[in-house]
Image (cartoon, rainbow, N blue to C red):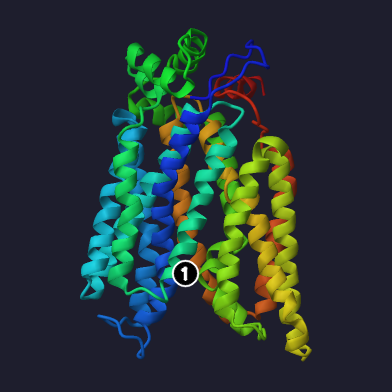
């Protein structure tokens, strides 16, 4: 857990490789979740095509359910995760997330009817919900404050690697072979993460001081962790384990403020249209009449999300959460305005060949800015802003709302396009996202370099 002694000499060398190793192992689970997301784009196109050689065919309605059931599964996964974390710990929940993910790929491999795909997507959603509602909390509890933001950001953006791999493999692998390949990171995660200790926070919360100290020593590689243990004890003091008492406290107006601050960030990420932009990138590029093969540009866009994730990992603990968010939202809003401008110029009958650069630059800007701030930082704050009593309840509440927002964002994109021209869709997204800038400046706390205890103390003062 992030419980650095504030009196400790700032020049003391800090050992962080066990924490970084743990984060890399957790990336395997996130890549698996990204593969599940990346599966949809190539295979739904094939499953609805009359020309592709597939084991089954889907109607547009069936394809819509296959695409959206993952997000409904995320809602269920978040609920299961919060209930299990309370008593079993974050490590066990993260390990158990590999089971529904394994079931998901097995059903995908064996699919002979749409029901198999429904079950597959729902199970992958359950796994993703369990992962996303646990991973930020676990990393925030084991990481040193100096690298906490970068570790969480790295894991959040590992999803981009999975989505890129899914989009890259889809056109060349059968659905069955894709499932076999996707089982590999899942199996590696189960084996390697089983060797990593549980969070010291969980042990101390349940009164197991010896195991908490042993866990802390493993992550810190220090013989004497008494000072950190004292901070940790102070952080968890009074954290009742009765979930109903926690729920009652969570529903007080003062405590509801924090989750709604984070939900506000998630809301802005979805009104940017990023879910739809990921799902419909190739269609957007085709409609923009570019002179370059759209599928090639989609691959470049997927690669750009990986670069953006690396950029976020490097900058989040240097610039801080608030200013990186402002830069991210400003750049994303400008990119959406430019994309809308492109469609406006097309409506004025400008030569599309002379405008090819504009939608490509717009979408590259979109990925660069949104994945370097607005995507990873809400998950970082989820792991930082809540006291020991309310972490699980807050994670359940926020992750559930996040899953529903994702479902709604994807489902409303096409009806929105049916109502208005493309340019108005992207200009609306741009205007909505610009509202996030004052919201971030006035409401988002800066937590850079602070221990979880210090963050709570600062929150109480406010």
Query: Label 1's element?
Result: helix
Residue at image location 39% in from the left, 68% down from the top: 67
Residue at image location 42% in from the left, 42% down from the top: 26
Residue 417 in sight in this render = no
* Quarter location, residue 286: bottom right
37 is higher (above) or lower (below) than 191: below
* Image spot of residue 255 (x, y percent): 53, 30
Task: Give the side of residue 177 with respect to residue 16, left or right.
Answer: left
Viewer-proximal residue among 397 and 295: 295
- The residue wearing badge 1 is 168
Residue at image location 38% in from the left, 86% down from the top: 49
* Image spot of residue 362 (x, y percent): 71, 69
Packing grade of label 1 (10 A; few <14, some 14-19, many >=20) is some
Viewer-proximal residue among 341 and 434: 341
Task: Give the side of residue 250 with respect to residue 46, left or right.
Answer: right
Q: Quadrant of the C terminus?
A: top right
Residue at image location 30% in from the left, 64% down from the top: 179
Residue 3 in sight in this render = yes
Task: Give the side of residue 140 with respect to residue 32, left or right.
Answer: right
């Amino acid at each position: 857990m992030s419980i650095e002694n504030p009196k400790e000499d700032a020049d003391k060398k800090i050992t962080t490789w066990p924490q970084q190793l743990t984060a890399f192992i957790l990336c395997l689970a996130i890549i698996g979740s990204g593969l599940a997301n990346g599966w949809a784009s190539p295979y739904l196109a094939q499953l609805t095509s009359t020309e592709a050689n597939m084991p089954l065919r889907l109607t547009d309605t069936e394809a819509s359910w296959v695409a959206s059931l993952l997000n409904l599964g995320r809602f269920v996964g978040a609920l299961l995760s919060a209930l299990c974390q309370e008593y079993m710990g974050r490590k066990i929940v993260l390990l158990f997330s590999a089971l529904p993910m394994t079931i998901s790929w097995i059903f995908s491999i064996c699919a002979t009817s749409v029901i198999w795909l429904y079950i597959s997507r729902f199970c992958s959603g359950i796994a993703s919900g369990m992962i996303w509602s646990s991973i930020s909390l676990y990393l925030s509890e084991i990481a040193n404050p100096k690298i906490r933001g970068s570790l969480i950001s790295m894991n959040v953006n590992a999803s981009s690697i999975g989505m890129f791999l899914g989009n890259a493999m889809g056109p060349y692998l059968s659905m069955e072979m894709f499932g076999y390949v996707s089982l590999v990171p899942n199996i590696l995660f189960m084996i390697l993460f089983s060797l990593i200790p549980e969070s010291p926070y969980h042990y101390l919360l349940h009164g197991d001081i010896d195991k908490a100290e042993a866990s802390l020593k493993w992550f810190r590689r220090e013989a004497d962790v008494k000072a950190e243990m004292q901070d940790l004890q102070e952080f968890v003091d009074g954290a009742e384990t009765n979930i109903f008492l926690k729920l009652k406290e969570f529903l007080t107006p003062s405590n509801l403020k924090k989750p709604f601050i984070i939900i506000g960030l998630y809301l802005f990420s979805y009104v940017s249209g990023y879910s739809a932009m990921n799902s419909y990138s190739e269609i957007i590029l085709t409609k923009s009449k570019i002179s370059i093969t759209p599928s090639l540009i989609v691959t470049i866009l997927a690669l750009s999300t990986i670069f953006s994730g690396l950029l976020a990992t490097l900058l989040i603990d240097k610039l801080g959460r608030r200013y990186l968010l402002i830069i991210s939202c400003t750049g994303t809003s400008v990119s959406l305005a430019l994309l809308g401008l492109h469609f406006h110029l097309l409506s004025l009958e400008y030569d599309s060949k002379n405008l090819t650069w504009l939608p490509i630059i717009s979408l590259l800007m979109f990925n660069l800015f949104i994945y370097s701030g607005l995507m990873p930082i809400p998950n970082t704050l989820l792991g930082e802003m809540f006291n020991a009593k309310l972490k699980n309840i807050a994670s359940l509440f926020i992750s559930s709302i996040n899953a529903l927002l994702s479902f709604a964002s994807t489902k409303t994109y096409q009806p929105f396009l049916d109502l208005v021209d493309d340019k108005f869709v992207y200009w609306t997204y741009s205007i909505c996202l610009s509202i996030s800038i004052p919201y971030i400046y006035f409401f988002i706390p800066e937590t850079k370099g602070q221990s979880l205890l210090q963050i709570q103390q600062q929150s109480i003062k406010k």
